[in-house]
Each structure stands twice: as C-alpha cells, then as structure tokens.
Image (cartoon, rainbow, N blue to C red):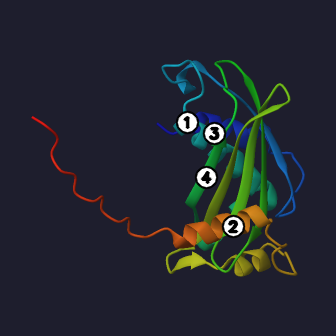
Amino acid sequence: MYPIVRLAWQMFRHRNDGPLALTGEHISHHICWPWDIDPWRELNNGRTLTLYDLGRMSAGRRVGLMPILKSRGWGLTVAGSSVRYRRRVRVFDRIEMRTRSVGWDDRFVYMVQSMWVRGNCTSEALLRTAVTSPEGIVAPDRLAEVLGVAGGSPPLPGWVAAWIAAEGERPWPPEPAPPVAPGPA
C-alpha cells in the first residue's frame, strides 16, 4: 500500500520551505520503519523506490509544480530508473534524501536522488520522469516555460547522457527469451 500518511507528513513538513529552482537540491528526512524492511532486516528495494517518490513529491511542491499540475490536469510519471545500492539501511535508521533535477531533453526530465545514513551514501537513483497530459507527454521545454525557467536545460552530465544512449539501444518491447532444451529427466 502506498504510504499516503508519510506523503502527507512530507508535504506538511516542507510546507514553509522556500521556493526551489528547477535544478535546485531538495533535502528531506525519513526513517526506515519496521514495515519497510525485508527478511534480511534492511530497507526493501521496492520501498526504497517508494521513499524516493516521497522526496520527489515534496521537491515538486517547492519547485511550484503541484499547482500547475492541478490547474492543467497534468500528471507525473517515471519512465525509467536505475538504482545503485551501496550500503544497507537498517530498521530505525534516519535517512537524509537529496533530490534534484539535472536537466532534460525533448521528452523527459532527468532526476538524481540519493539516500544518506550517518554521512554515508547508501543508494543513488537516476530517474527519467515526465509530465503527462491527456494528449500525452508534455515537452519539458513547455514545462520549464510554465515554471518561468528560461534558457533551456543545463548540459546533462556525461554519465546521464551515456545512460540515455544505452536505454536507446535497449529493445522495446523486450525480446522473448530463446527456447531452452529440456534438461535430463
């Protein structure tokens, strides 16, 4: 179940934070609760992605995105992600999350998020996100214009551009697996 109460708490907690530039860094704090862990007593990888959602929502509010989405009937979606896990997050650990947009292309906005526990980075996510409308994906340049951002996207970091290129090579829809000969009886 989606943690609606935690989302409401994050929105309430950051209600008085000042405006944030589209590429500014938003910092939020979270706790790894017992219902977030897997059988190995660490933060579940699926819950990690859900906590990253919470960071993006409060960052989006600070950027000024939420009233625009509501007034225009637009939505948000994640169109791809890559997560690098490096350290365990244990139950009751306090997490500092850092969220920022690093730039955009003609269809997507690219975001980087990281989780930190006791000064150590535990994971980092690169996300391809989009604003959607009933007509389809809203061009990021149009979104930037509505947000009052001039000048286009900053240059994407090389590693982000390489990820975008690699994703462009990935077949869609996925290719079926080759048939496997039956094993010995």
Determine the residue positioned at 60% across, 34% down: 5
Badge number at residue 162 = 2
Q: Quadrant of residue 174?
A: bottom left
Asked which secondary structure carries label 1, the reply is helix
Can residue 74 be seen in the rendering of this structure?
A: no
> Which tag, 1 or 2, sits closer to the chain's start?
1
Determine the residue positioned at 80% across, 60% down: 63
Q: Nearer the viewer, residue 6 or 160?
A: 160
| Contact, mark 4 vs mark 1 (Cβ under 8 Å) | no
> Which tag, 2 or 4, sits closer to the chain's start?
4
Q: Nearer the viewer, residue 129 or 157?
A: 157
Residue 170 falls left or right of residue 61: left
Three-letter code for the amino acid on which mark 4 is drawn: Ser
Q: CA distance from mark 1 to mark 2?
A: 24 Å
> Which tag, 1 or 3, sits closer to the chain's start?
1
Determine the residue positioned at 72% across, 21% down: 93
Q: CA distance from mark 1 to mark 3?
A: 10 Å
Mark 2 vs mark 3: in front: 2
> Which tag, 2 or 3, sits closer to the chain's start?
3
Badge number at residue 82 = 4
In the displayed structure, 67 sits above or below 35; it is: below
Q: Quadrant of residue 137?
A: bottom right
